[in-house]
Image: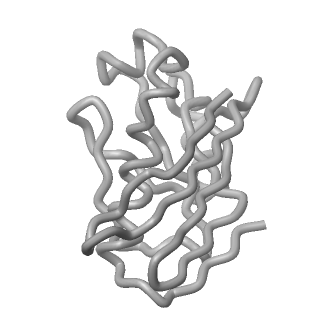
Amino acid sequence: MVAFAYTQTAKDVNILLQKTIDLSALKAHYSEEEVSGYTPIILINDENIPDNLILFKFNKRVKLLTPEEIETLSKIYKGNLDSYFQLKIFKLDDSKAEVIGTFRKHNPINIKVVFEKDNGDWKIISSKAG
């Protein structure tokens, strides 16, 4: 289940998601194909994800794909499509946010990041990936 509270701007959502995919704890989990840009990094885009997100990883734009689009692409794409993030819970209020999700379809890596807004900047208070 993905739950959003749109009390923040699209910019805030973009910043929080970018900080989540950039977690240093995830570095050890990225494959050589992902780092080189050969395998795309994907964020599952469902009705709860804003369509106008612009995220980058390894100097490549993160693909926003629906589960149906991934299914269709997997039939024609010869590479690996296991490299995707799926949010389980995403909560926002004026000064706190929490992102909980997974990275990868097979052998998923659980992710939890707690943010706090300090002087207009989102800071990671705690994070876990693994």
* Furthest residue toward left: 59
Where is residue 96? Give x, y as percent: 52, 72
Q: Residue at x 48, y 90 (%)?
A: 7
Confirm whether residue 29 shows in the render.
yes
Image coloring type: one colour
Where is residue 41? Give x, y as percent: 44, 36
Q: Residue at x 71, y 37 (%)?
A: 110
- The vertical placement of 52 against 58, above or below, is below
Relative horizontal placement of residue 117, taking residue 30 as reference (left or right): left
Q: Nearer the viewer, residue 79 or 90?
A: 90
Q: How many marks?
A: 0
Where is residue 56? Give x, y as percent: 29, 44
Q: Residue at x 59, y 84 (%)?
A: 5
Q: Quadrant of residue 14?
A: bottom left
Q: Nearer the viewer, residue 123 or 44?
A: 123
Q: Residue at x 56, y 39 (%)?
A: 84
- The vertical placement of 5 against 24, above or below, is below
Q: Nearer the viewer, residue 97 or 119?
A: 119
Which image quadrant: the C terminus? top right
- The vertical placement of 61 against 82, above or below, is below
* Furthest residue toward top: 32
Q: Quadrant of residue 40?
A: top left
Where is residue 62? Give x, y as percent: 36, 46
Relative horizontal placement of residue 12, taking residue 64 as reference (left or right): left
Q: Quadrant of residue 1?
A: bottom right
Relative horizontal placement of residue 83, taking residue 14 as reference (left or right): right
Confirm whether residue 72 shows in the render.
no
